Image (tube, grey):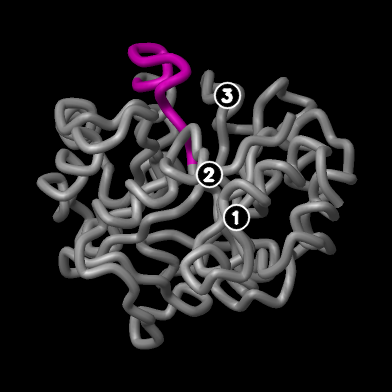
Amino acid sequence: MVTLYPAIDIRGGRAVRLLRGDYARETGYDADPVDAARRWVGGGAEILHVVDLDGARAGVPANLAVVERIAAAVDVPVQLGGGLRDRDSVEAAFAAGAARAVLGTAALRDPALAAELASAFGERIVASVDARGGRVAVAGWEEETETAVEDAIAALAEGGVRHFVHTPVEVDGTLAGPGLERLGGPLEACERAGAEMIYSGGVGTLADLARLRDLGRPGLGGVIVGRALYERRFTVAAAIAVLDGKMG
């Protein structure tokens, strides 16, 4: 089964979405991200994907007070990323109510830290391996590296990480469809390691969700959806029905 992860990206205390990871191309939605959280959970969401965009850019968490209010307002797990680059920040995320911590830049620059945290916290640790042109992008997607996504996944999985978020930055926020043409390699890397991929980026229609579902890949465990939900292209309930194979 493929799980829906409604997204809540926080910048300046508001729920927003960026286009292709560009901080200069922001669309604002909810003035209070808690409203989005309640709306998604009210629609049937069983987990939320929250990103502290300010934290991702600054390298330290910046919106933990908002995260704490979200976690207190809903009765589903919150998966949090953005600025979690050392053990203290990960523990602060858990203290704020996050059930899972997503490591991005820290995991890729310091695999030993990711392995240490995976050993300490197990399934609560997720690595975000995002890419432009098949190469890993870090620091809030503003820095590109020469590392192939598949190599990064393999190295982190060897260190004990079992959950990965993967976003092809080129399609993120576009509503133009998922980046399936580059998805095969990263999915294969997850499957070889017995790990789960949570895909994010470009989903704009229920047909896009059906295309991901119909890949039938054991490594694809979840799909993150943001802008399409905010702009009411479809509902949380409809998205879940498609991913469960009950629609489309």
The percent coordinates of residue 158 (x first, y second) are 60, 22
Q: Disc 1 vs disc 3: Cβ atoms closer than 8 Å? A: no
Query: What segment is highlighted magenta in the picture?
Result: 117-127
Q: Is residue 142 magenta?
A: no
Determine the residue positioned at 24% across, 32% down.
90
Question: Residue at the left extreme?
Answer: 65
Q: Earlier in the sequence, mark 1 or mark 3?
A: 3
Q: CA distance from mark 2 to mark 1?
A: 9 Å
Q: Nearer the viewer, residue 79 or 87?
A: 79
Asked if residue 152 lies left or right of residue 92, the reply is right
Q: Is residue 238 visible?
A: yes
Which secondary structure, mark 3?
A: loop
Q: Is residue 73 left or right of residue 243?
A: left
Above or below for 84 versus 206: above
Q: Which badge, 2 or 1, is on the more N-terminal residue?
A: 2
Q: Secondary structure at mark 1?
A: strand
Look at label 3 and name its amino acid: Arg
Mark 3 lies on residue: 162
The main secondary structure of the magenta stretch is helix
Q: Quadrant of residue 53?
A: bottom left
